[in-house]
Image: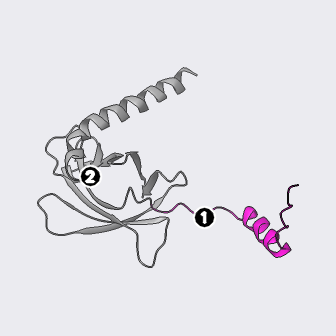
Amino acid sequence: MKKKRPAPPASTLSQVKKQKRQAPPPPAVSSVFAGSWIGETQGFDDSPAHLWEISIPYPPYPQMLQVLNCWEGENSMRHFSGMMEPDGCSFKIGRFTGVLVDREHFWIPGWDTNDIRNDEGPDYDVVFSRPGLAELSAREVWLKVKDSVEESERTIDDD
């Protein structure tokens, strides 16, 4: 004969019910974004590398990220912050969105703006890679992502 499990105390049941009604917490900065990144501008060979260090601010605000950055060859660092998007795989910095491609790459469409080129010419996408071997595949990653985005735009236009 099976033994019946005792029912949990009423206080435990009410706590569980309350937890289910609460809104989910904002997404935390994924550990895949934290750390060092090297950004390569796609389609504009004269642009220096974007050197980034992404961290979670202290005291911790899990949905916020901080970026220390500079151009390759510069010694001065700049700082800006962004917010994780609800999907947990992307973040916003102003009007720009960084999108995780895989554990070693993310891209930001139009990040390399023409403001550094006297407002002449287009803005360029930047693929950020972990330092090392991942940097060698930045262009290949960008081409795949770009093809995927163009295909989805064509599908939307056909509807």
- The residue under the point 58% across, 22% down is 159
Instruction: Tell me what residue is drawn at x 51 percent, y 24 percent.
Output: 155
Residue interval drawn in magenta = 1-29
Can you tell which quarter of the image residue 17 is in?
Answer: bottom right
Give the crowd class for mark 2: few <14, some 14-19, many >=20 residues within 10 Å. Answer: many
Identify the residue shown where x is 54% and y is 27%.
156
- Given residues 148 and 25, the one toward you in this image is 25
Give the farthest residue toward the bottom.
59
Mark 1, residues whose alpha carbon is within 10 Å: few (<14), some, or many (≥20)? few
On screen, residue 16 above or below 140: below
Q: Assess whether residue 2 is covered by the magenta stretch.
A: yes
* Mark 2 → mark 1, Cα distance in angstroms: 28 Å
Image coordinates of residue 139 in percent, x first then y, are 24, 37
What residue did someone put label 2 on?
Answer: 130
Q: Is residue 136 left or right of residue 25?
A: left
Q: Which mark is residue 25?
A: 1
Q: Please, which colouring scheme is shown?
A: one colour
Q: Is residue 14 left or right of residue 60?
A: right
Where residue 53 appears, as percent x and y from the top left, is: 28, 63
* Amino acid on which disc 2 is placed: Arg
Check residue 112 for magenta coloring.
Answer: no
Could you say where residue 88 lies in the image, as x and y percent from the top left?
50, 54
- Helix, strand or loop for disc 2: loop
Q: Name the residue at 72% across, 66% down.
A: 19
In the rendered structure, which amino acid carries the disc numbered 1? Pro
